[in-house]
Image (tube, helix red, strand yellow):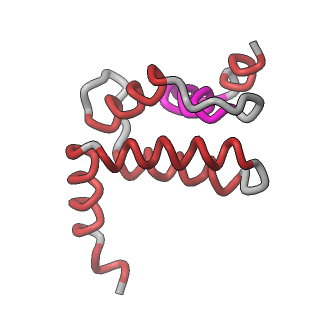
Amino acid sequence: MMRNIVAGTADTEFEKRLTKATFHLDSKEPKEKHVIYMLECMNGEHKDHVSTIGAIKFIFERHISHLDNWAINTKVFIVLHRGLQNIKVNRKIVKDLKAKEHLMH
């Protein structure tokens, strides 16, 4: 119940699912349905399309804002790892970084 209350403060469905997947009061891994939903959003397979870079930004913001909580950080890294294992998401990240390569110099 607390997970739903905390997730209710998020703006988009992607942010709600990220909050639910990285909830801090349980020490279990993120629920598979939330991780799959986020991967589908990043792939563009879902109506709530989120850009890959925007999704990574949300994930890192969640990590940075809760550096002192080991449960959230572990779950964030699990979600990030699953995203990077997905070939479509991985290619989009590389493509977006390559397009913005001039900003890194």
Q: Is residue 59 left or right of residue 81?
A: right
Main secondary-structure element of the magenta-colored stretch: helix
Residue 54, x across and y down, in percent: 43, 48
Please identify the residue farthest to the bottom as the structure is shown: 105
- Relative to 92, does residue 96 appear above or below in the rendering? below
The residue located at (44%, 30%) in the rendering is: 35
Please identify the residue farthest to the front as the structure is shown: 28
- Relative to 90, does residue 75 appear above or below in the rendering? above
Q: Is residue 99 left or right of residue 1?
A: left
The residue located at (27%, 52%) in the rendering is: 90
Q: Give the magenta-colored segment's residue range.
A: 10-23
Residue 53, x across and y down, in percent: 38, 52
The residue located at (48%, 41%) in the rendering is: 79
Mark count: 0
Residue 62, x across and y down, in percent: 62, 47
Q: In which quarter of the image is the C terminus?
A: bottom left
- Relative to 12, does residue 87 appear above or below in the rendering? below
Quarter where residue 30 is shown: top right
The residue located at (77%, 30%) in the rendering is: 25
Quarter where residue 7 is shown: top right
Residue 8, x across and y down, in percent: 68, 21
Q: In which quarter of the image is the N terminus?
A: top right
Residue 54 colored in magenta in the image:
no
- Relative to 19, does residue 33 appear above or below in the rendering? above
